[in-house]
Image (cartoon, rainbow, N blue to C red):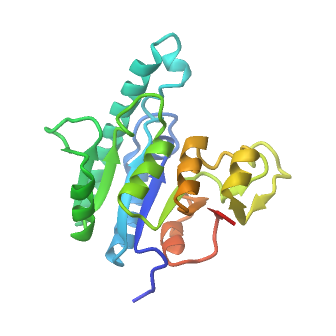
Amino acid sequence: MDKLLYKRILLKLSGEALAGDQKYGIEPQTIHAFAQEIAEVADLGCEVVLVIGGGNIFRGMSGSAKGMDRASADYMGMLATVMNALAVQDAIEKLGRETRVLTAIAMREVAEPYIRRRGIRHLEKGRVVICAAGTGNPYFTTDTAAALRAMELKCGAILKATKVDGVYDKDPMKHADAVMFKRVTYLQALEKRLGVMDATAISLAMDNDLPIVVFNLFTKGNIMRVVLGEDIGTIVTGG
């Protein structure tokens, strides 16, 4: 069996990733492809926690929320993450892997309430745990929720899946001369505003010495490569 670098990971997916080539909504083929990779990693014995954004459906800070009360818009965004979580749960379970959706906002008819000890127990039983509804509080992003859940559930690293290969000095989608970093410190990410995750999430990771690995989700097999310790993407650590 391949040796795992991380026994338990938190994988942070953006909601936009689930839309595939569409601008919004959920694209079933894209979700199926992600689910296959997640199931393969879990089959190796890696315990997987997922935190998924909701930007493909509704984003509290977007133009669609303009003029709305910020708290109300953020709660709508949290509900969007639950919809995404249920879609990913369905795709993973169709591959024969047990999952549990845990929500920070109680909705017992569709998911379990988030309880830290229950989440850990599900992981120990080999289930993929999908944490939805962010932290349950407005004004906090799903990046912050990812950092919080990673620490609560004792994950070895946060895997931040993106559309690009790692962390760059400027947006590689707009600048052809953008330079990718292989290693970045938490302080560099904060001071240079490198866009790894939001400042609250990075600060939480820094305070608890939790590594963040930023990599391209759309290169097939990359999740497995990170878990096995291959040198891909950018790693954000204390030094």
Tell me if residue 77 can be seen: yes
The quadrant of the picture occupied by the N terminus is bottom left
Q: Hey, which residue is sitting farthest right in the picture?
A: 177
In the figure, 220 relative to 78: above or below?
A: below
Q: Looking at the rendering, which quadrant does residue 48 occupy?
A: bottom left
Drawn side of residue 134 relative to residue 194, left or right: left
**So how many labels did they put on this image?**
0
Q: Of 85 and 31, which appears nearest the observer?
A: 85
Q: Whole-percent x and y of residue 166? A: 66, 58
Q: Hey, which residue is sitting farthest top in the picture?
A: 67
The quadrant of the picture occupied by the C terminus is bottom right
In the figure, 150 relative to 131: above or below?
A: below
Q: Residue at x 42, y 21 (%)?
A: 71
Q: Hey, which residue is sitting farthest left in the picture?
A: 109
Q: Residue at x 45, y 58 (%)?
A: 11
Q: Whole-percent x and y of residue 104? A: 30, 40
Tell me if residue 29 can be seen: no
Q: Whole-percent x and y of residue 181? A: 75, 61
Q: Of 219 and 169, which appears nearest the observer?
A: 169
Q: Whole-percent x and y of residue 17? A: 50, 46
Q: Residue at x 53, y 74 (%)?
A: 225
Q: Residue at x 52, y 34 (%)?
A: 23
